[in-house]
Image (cartoon, rainbow, N blue to C red):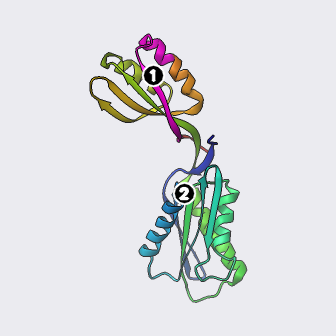
Amino acid sequence: MYFSYITVRDYARAEYIVKRSKFIATVKEVNSEQEAEAFVSDIRDEFYDATHNCYAYSVLLNNVAIKRFNDDGEPGGTAGMPILNVMEQKGLSNVALVVTRYFGGILLGAGGLVRAYSHAASLALEKAGFVKMLPAKIVIIRMPYHLLNSINNLINTLGASVCDSKYQEDVCLSILIESCKVDEFTRAAYELSSGNIVIDIDKDAYIKGQSV
């Protein structure tokens, strides 16, 4: 069973300068460790000349959070963990955040580094915004062509969306719909079609809910 969680709404980047050191925080929604690591690699390539590219990410796998962080040469506990702490304070999952630092020549000290990385991370997260992800299902529908408009109206009414469509002898639609609305959709679709429709529940997924 999937559970709801909160993630970032948009890709975002924010900058923060303190004592001539520039901190560039970049955040993105990710859905696997592979996506998170690829994102970190992309940022490192983009800012190849930076002094540090520190990061943290938290990814759900079977409803269990996998969390990683890296200080990338900064004193232990002054960069990666503070970034992760900011994400945890916001209650976020499936998020990767990299804070790039260009050293400005003035040492910040351990406390100053923690504050700088935390603040840069917070700025990027505020800019990205947050959205609640809701448990959903992929539902496969097979029907005659004359039912297509009625079923599409039902899909729109329930806030679902069409992921894939095939038009052969019959119409086959794959739709993404919030789990709590599947029974309602199934009942209404059978009523609209007088039973002349085939509905299969395919697999679990997520659908974006409201911004939070």
User: Mark 2 belongs to which amino acid?
Assistant: Lys
Going 40% across and 14% down the picture, which residue do you hit? 196
Q: Taking 84 as reference, is 64 above or below it? A: above
Closer to the camera in the image, 212 or 56: 56
Q: Which mark is residue 17?
A: none
Q: Is residue 144 magenta?
A: no
Q: Taking 124 as reference, is 52 above or below it? A: below
Closer to the camera in the image, 65 or 49: 65
The image shows a total of numbered marks equal to: 2
Going 55% across and 27% down the picture, which residue do you hit? 182
Q: Which mark is residue 127?
A: 2
Badge 1 crowding class, 10 Å Cα cut-off, few under 14, some 14 to 19, many 20 or more, is: some
Q: Where is residue 124 in the image (x, y as percent from the top left)?
A: 56, 62
Give the foreground label among 1 and 2.
1
Secondary structure type for disc 1: helix
User: Residue lying farthest bottom?
Assistant: 105
Image quarter (top left, top right, bottom left or bottom right) of the C terminus: top right
Image quarter (top left, top right, bottom left or bottom right) of the N terminus: top right
- Please tell me which of labels 1 and 2 falls first in the chain: 2
Q: Give the range drawn in magenta.
A: 188-206
